[in-house]
Image (cartoon, rainbow, N blue to C red):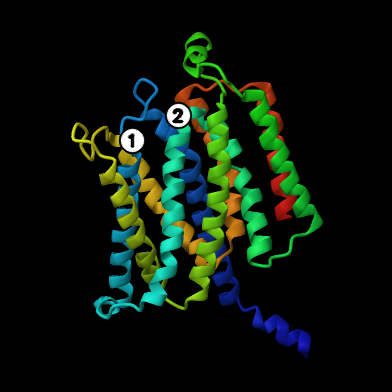
Amino acid sequence: MIAVQNIGTRSPARIRRQWVKRVLWGVLFGLMVLIYGSHAPLITLTKVDGQVPFNPSSCVFMIELSKLLVSLASLVLTEGTSALQAPPPLLRVAPYAVPALLYALNNNLVVLMQAYMDPSSYQVLSNLKIASTALLYSFCLGKRLRPSQWLALGLLMCAGACHSYSSLDLGDPGRVEAEEGPRIHITAWGLFLVLVYCCVSGLAAVYTERVLKSQKLPLSLQNIYLYVFGVAINGLSSFSFMTGEKSFLEGYSGVVWVIIVGQAANGLLMSVVLKHGSGITRLFVISCSMLVNALLSWAMLGLQLTPFFLLPVSMIGLAAYLYYR
C-alpha cells in the first residue's frame, strides 16, 4: 500500500513541473555562462591603442542604474506601487550597503585588470575565486566540505600558479605583442589585482547570499535596496574622477553598450541564483565560462594559445569535477 501511494504522488503534472524547472535553470545557467565568458573579450575589443577608451566607473554606474530600473519595473508589475509607498526601516536596508561596496570595487577591478593581462589569462586566474568563495562558505556559513572538495580547491590553486608561472611577463607586453602577435601574458601587477579580486568576489557572494535568504522579501525589492547603494557609490566614484576634458559617456561604442546590457542581465540572474539556489551554482558558472572565453578570444581576437595553457585548463576541469560530483 505504501509503495502504491508513493508511486501515486509522482503524478505526470508533478514530473512535468520538475522538468520545466530544470529546463529554466538550465537556460539561466547557459545565459550566465555566455555573458560571463564574453565579458573580458568584449572589453578587449573596445581598446584603442592598448587602452580602454571609456571611464570604467561610468560604465559600472550605467550597469547599476540599469539593474535598478529593471528591478523597479519588476516590483511595480508584480507587487504594485503600494510596495514603494512606505519608507523601509533603516535596519532592513543598511545590510545591502556592504555588498554594494564590494561589488563596486570588483566591477572596477575587472576593467582595470584587462590592461595587465590577456582575456584568457584573466578567465583562468579568476577561477581562483572558487577557492576563496568555498573557504568563506566553510568558515562564515558553516558549510562543511568533503575531502574531495578540498582536493579540488588545491588543484585550482596549483592551476593558477602553473598558469601564472608560464605566462608571467615582467617586460613590455606591448613590445612582445608587436613582435609575435597576441599571446598569453600577465604582469606582476595584474597577478596581484587578480588575487584581490578573487578575495573580494568571494566575500561579496557569501555576504549577499546570506542577506537575500535571511529576509523574507520579494527579490525585486531586495534588488532595489542593493542597487540603490550601487548607483550611489558608483555615481560618486564616477563623477569624482571625471575631468573637464572628458565627458561622462566619452569613448562609448556599440560594444560598450553590449557590455552594459550583458552585465546588468548577469547581475539580475545572479541574484535569482543566490536567492533561490546556492552560491555553488555561481562557482560552476565561473568554471564553465572559461570555454566560452577561450573560443571568443580565438575567434574575435586571434589569441594564440600555447600547449602549456592546456595544463591549467585541464586541472581546473578536474577540480570542477571533484568539487561538484
Q: Residues within 10 Å of mark 2 (few under 14, many from 20)?
A: many
What is the secondary structure assignment of the residue under circle 1?
helix
* Total numbered labels: 2
Residue 273 x/y as whole percent: 52, 62
Q: Is residue 190 left or right of residue 139?
A: left
Sequence-first disc among 2 and 1: 2
Q: Is residue 233 left or right of residue 128?
A: left
Dot 1 amino acid type: Val
Rendered image quadrant of residue 310: top right
* Mark linked to residue 74: none
Residue nearer the viewer, 273 or 104 = 104
Residue nearer the viewer, 176 or 264 = 176
**Of all residues shown, which one is farthest toward the top?**
179
* Residue at left offset 40%, top offset 70%: 94
* Residue at left offset 60%, top offset 36%: 124
Real-space CA distance between mark 2 and mark 1, rounded to the nearest whole angstrom: 17 Å
Residue nearer the viewer, 93 or 27 = 93
- Residue indicated by mark 1: 255
Quarter of the image that includes the C terminus: bottom right
**Of all residues shown, which one is farthest toward the left?**
244
* Residue at left offset 50%, top offset 69%: 211
**Of all residues shown, which one is farthest toward the right?**
147
- Residue indicated by mark 2: 115
